[in-house]
Image (cartoon, rainbow, N blue to C red):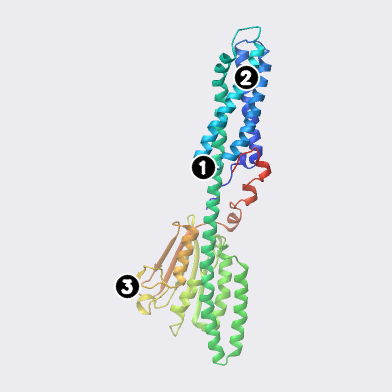
Amino acid sequence: MLPVKPTPFFADKNRAFWNLQLGGWLGAMMLRTMIILTNEQPSGLLLIVLVEMMTGFSISLVLAVIYHQLINRTALVTWGVTALVLTAAVTLYASIDSWLQGIYYANIRETSFAQRFVALIFLDGSLLGAWSALYYAINFFLQVEEQADRLERLEAQATSAQLAMLRYQLNPHFLFNTLNSISTLVLLKQTEPANAMLTRLSGFLRHTLISEPGAKVSVAQEVETLKLYLDIERMRFEDRLRTVFSIDPAAAEATIPSFLLQPLVENAIKYAVSPQEEGARISLSAQLVGQRLRLTVSDTGPGLHGGRARTTFPSGFAGAGRTVSTGVGLANIRDRLAQAYGEDHLFEIRTPADGGFTVIIEIPYQRLADHAEGPKPIPASTVNSPPASRALGFDT
């Protein structure tokens, strides 16, 4: 997600309005001054130009107040009233200019008020027409920008909610299996192992509460969390559960969605360690492949060909000549990867003929420090200016 941020110039819309207002009318005055000086006209015209620009400046302020009330009306009302107001403003501006020039040229040339009015209405109409067009164009641009920013925020909130839902889905799934094991120990009157498992379960859950549902953590942090989970499972399987970790130092700093690996290990325990008397070995590796992070979780269980079908495959995955039903674990991971990375990820399942089961995940590499310094949403207070400051400024 790349949030749409306001253009820096328009971060303070009231200040931007006054900067453009002053700059535009000063520019028009400088242009008229250059024409007078270039054509070697009397310097007394400079005073007339100054008064004319001040008049146009004042009329445009009145137009800004009126346009501010019209911009959010229906198109018919906005453009209809704007045309009427602009016509009246141009007529007033040209009338004042004609009166001023009549005073200046009273003893120099013989021209009627109507002649001066017709000559000046095109110039004054061009100035106020261009000013009105720019006012509406800039305001419509700012409205589109704000709507895009609001849509981006809504999409980000929807994505966060989806990630949180998928993340919370893992807790009851894991708790069911763990509490079922504790219940079994209690029924067998093995109170010490049951108490130890409860203690470790509370520590694991306390750790899960610290991390935000949609947050990303480093691979090293994820492995530490995974080891807390494995400590609980080792009380059930003891030497039957064997683990091997191979984490490259550079890969350890990469970021991944929190609790991405736990369902993979839980799946391996359920279908590789649990059904075999000798247990199984679960291997986890993390390495960099170019600018991508590759995570591999494999086990030495029977796989698809030598044991029962794993019911946690993603929807549509075909194994052993048939489509396997969708469950929570792996399908949850696929959904979380799609939410977090879109199409820019790999989720691959390999099942060798001689047994075993491997899941490979590839995602873009990003260090935890870089992720923390990435773009952050702008607070709403900085997107919308206070109403008082927008009385004459750009309206959004």
| Residue 176 vs residue 99, the one in the foreground | 99
- Local SS, label 3: strand
Q: Residue at x 54, y 73 (%)?
A: 171
- Local SS, label 1: loop
- Label 1 with label 3: CB-CB less than 8 Å: no
x and y percentages locating residue 274 in the rendered image: 46, 82
Q: Is residue 13 above or below residue 271?
A: above
x and y percentages locating residue 266 in the rendered image: 49, 75
Alpha carbon distance from label 2 to label 3? 87 Å
Alpha carbon distance from label 2 to label 1? 34 Å
Mark 2 packing: few (<14 Cα in 10 Å), some, or many (20+)?
Answer: many
Residue that numbered label 3 is attached to: 322
Q: Residue furthest left?
A: 321
Alpha carbon distance from label 1 to label 3? 59 Å
Q: Quick one: quadrant of the C terminus?
A: top right
x and y percentages locating residue 50 in the rendered image: 67, 20
Residue that numbered label 2 is attached to: 97
x and y percentages locating residue 98 in the rendered image: 61, 17
Mark 3 packing: few (<14 Cα in 10 Å), some, or many (20+)?
Answer: few
Disc 2 residue type?
Asp
Q: Residue at x 67, y 21 (%)?
A: 51
Point out the frontmost of discs 2 and 3. Answer: 2
- Label 2 with label 3: CB-CB less than 8 Å: no
Q: Residue at x 54, y 80 (%)?
A: 178
Residue that numbered label 1 is attached to: 74
Task: Say whether residue 380 is left or right of residue 315.
Answer: right
Q: Residue furthest bottom?
A: 189
Q: Is residue 148 above or below residue 107?
A: below
Between discs 2 and 1, the one toward the N terminus: 1
